[in-house]
Amino acid sequence: DGYRNTNQVSDDYRYQDGNYGAPNDGYYRGGNEPAQEEDAQSDVTEGHDEDDEVYEGEYQGIPHPDDIKEKQKKRAPAMDDEYRDRADLMAERMEDEEQLAHQYENIIEECGHGRFQWTLFFVLGLALMADGVEVFVVGFVLPSAEKDMCLSSSNKGMLGLIVYLGMMVGAVLLGGLADKLGRKQCLIISLAINAAFAFLSSFVQGYGFFLFCRLISGLGIGGTLPIVFAYFSEFLSREKRGEHLSWLCMFWMIGGIYASAMAWSIIPHYGWGFSMGTKYHFHSWRVFVLVCALPCIASLVALKFMPESPRFLLEIGKHDEAWMILKQVHDTNMRAKGEPERVFTVSYIKTPKQVDEFIEIQSSTGTWYQRWLVRITTTLKQVWDNVLYCLTAQYRMNTLMLAVVWFTMALSYYGLIVWFPDMIRYFQDEAYESRVKIFDEEEVSHFTFNFTLENQIHRNGEYRNDKFIGMKFKEVRFEDSLFEDCYFEDVRSSETFFENCTFISTIFYNTDLYKHKFIDCRLINSTFMGEKEGCHIDFEEDNDFLIYLVSFLGSLSVLPGNIISALLMDKIGRIKMIGGSMLISAVCCFFLFFGNSESAMIGWQCLFCGASIAAWNALDVITVELYPTDKRATAFGILNGLCKFGAILGNSIFSSFVGITKVVPILLASSALVGGGLLALRLPETREQVLM
């Protein structure tokens, strides 16, 4: 107990708020006592060595009275806290946190903004980029995956929503854990889960397993958004926070551009794959899924070289670790500025009073899984307490208003983002159907069809002794037709049906003309042999380059909005940015009534995305600043989880009106944006406050 290292010695005089003073740590230093005369000191200590003094009861195992008094002094504060009311302890902690907030702001300003923050900016940017990629992956692979895994319409819809479901759960769970286990540790867990299951999903063949992998992958990446913003904000000073958090949002846009470019350049190259027998096929869309995991892996590797948030460490009482990290930030920035001689002057940082009780179980207590079960349940209880804390009187109104703004923004944005490509595809289908060729009462005999028939309707035709060999049917319909003594071999078809037709003495060999494609047909002496197994990708049909282009342009269109929001975030404030952006986006929605062509829809999509991105950026910033450090990631996770729930609803509602009416989606999106924008104006402005 008597041993004090050099760090403790250096703390004898601490720098607090610009003043030097003696520490108040219970040690007696005699600084205020009158000094004894040198002669008197010499007389008292002459011939006496304190180190050689032996207490007579030592050999009997009796502790020295001075040792007992010293231990009682050290134990006294803990005994006082034990009998104090929890409300008093919380009040003291709140006072400590307020002092820490102002001191920490001064420390970050002393550390400066430089190389360290920019390095962390790119590392966390890669994690945010992985989040952006995850949103687009399933949409790009669906056309190919539905053929590769024989997906029905309901299965396709579930695959599109399962990622958002995983992200919703991951945001709440991992965001809450980040306030208990640390920003860096939870971000590593989040990225590792995403990378592992994204990699695995590219190899699995069955729909169920693929769905499960994308669910867990989404759960992992869902935790990145709340953790990344909480993590980065705690290395930024007040005057830099709004601007640089907005610059960080650009990586979500870069993720969308990356996914669109990779889909455009990889998926159409169906030769970029391999097969193992007849059961295992690794097509180019699976290569695309692998490539989309690269930003996540890169961020995961780089994050290993980044430190934990010092603000988080101070919250849990780890003063020395936090001090070392802040000194590292200071020295890194000063060396980069060419001022390596500048000394980090802070020697003591205020740490809040620790209130949470976490009892560590000894290794001899119970079995290993019982110990882990207690640790997990205790941590989850602490996370749940944090969730409830966000709804206490102090934060209830802000949380509820932010929840409405996040939800309305997500409902309209994600709903329209899905609605735009669906409407463009609907216009394409209408144009395609308008070019259909109709053949009535044709008679063909002794003819061999070995070429593709596409977008045709054959009515009341008669086909006798004809051969259909090595050919394709695309969007072909036969109605009230007769096939007699015909032979079908190695035929592939998509959206092809026979309605009310008669087949007499006809043979089908190695085709994908299955029973469900014959509607109310009569089969007389006809034989099906060696039907094609599984599903088959037709890249010429399924890979729609225009959809990739639409997503690419939609992602690129937010660049001006990102730049404007970053430059103006700290000038006009977060509230005006959210309200103004949402109201302008609502006006853009009304122009969609005039979108009656593919080019018009693409143009209005770009305008809407560019106008709405400023609201997203300001929402991220204000959510970080409204909550204290020990609740920041939890609150962000709750609101982001609600955002993903809004995305699920938006996708489901808006897609159901494609081809039926434009009025409902447009009115729903615009009214949600107007309501959310007006409510956002009632939120408190945070640009001048320190990070609590």
Image (tube, grey):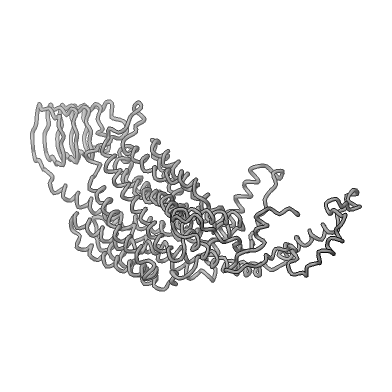
Is 450 left or right of 52, judged from the image as shown? Answer: left
Q: Residue at x 65, y 45 (%)?
A: 370
Position in image of residue 280 (x %, y %): 36, 30
Relative height, residue 532 to residue 214 (above, below):
above
The residue drawn where x is 11% and y is 34% is 462
Give x and y (percent) for residue 626.
48, 66
In the rendered image, which quarter is residue 658 located in? bottom left
Q: Quadrant of residue 263?
A: top left
Observer able to see residue 640: yes
Identity of the residue drawn at 19% across and 55% down: 599
Q: Is residue 253 left or right of residue 192?
A: left
Residue 212 visible in the picture: no
Residue 522: x and y in percent read: 21, 34
**Who's the residue at 36% across and 60% down the image?**
411
- Of residues 182 and 50, which is closer to you in this image? 50
Q: Is residue 117 above or below residue 153?
A: below
* Residue 340 percent coordinates (x, y): 49, 54
Image quadrant in which the N terminus is located:
bottom right
In the rendered structure, the answer to whether residue 397 lies left or right of residue 655 reads right
Q: Pick whichever, 331 or 410, lies toward us.
A: 331
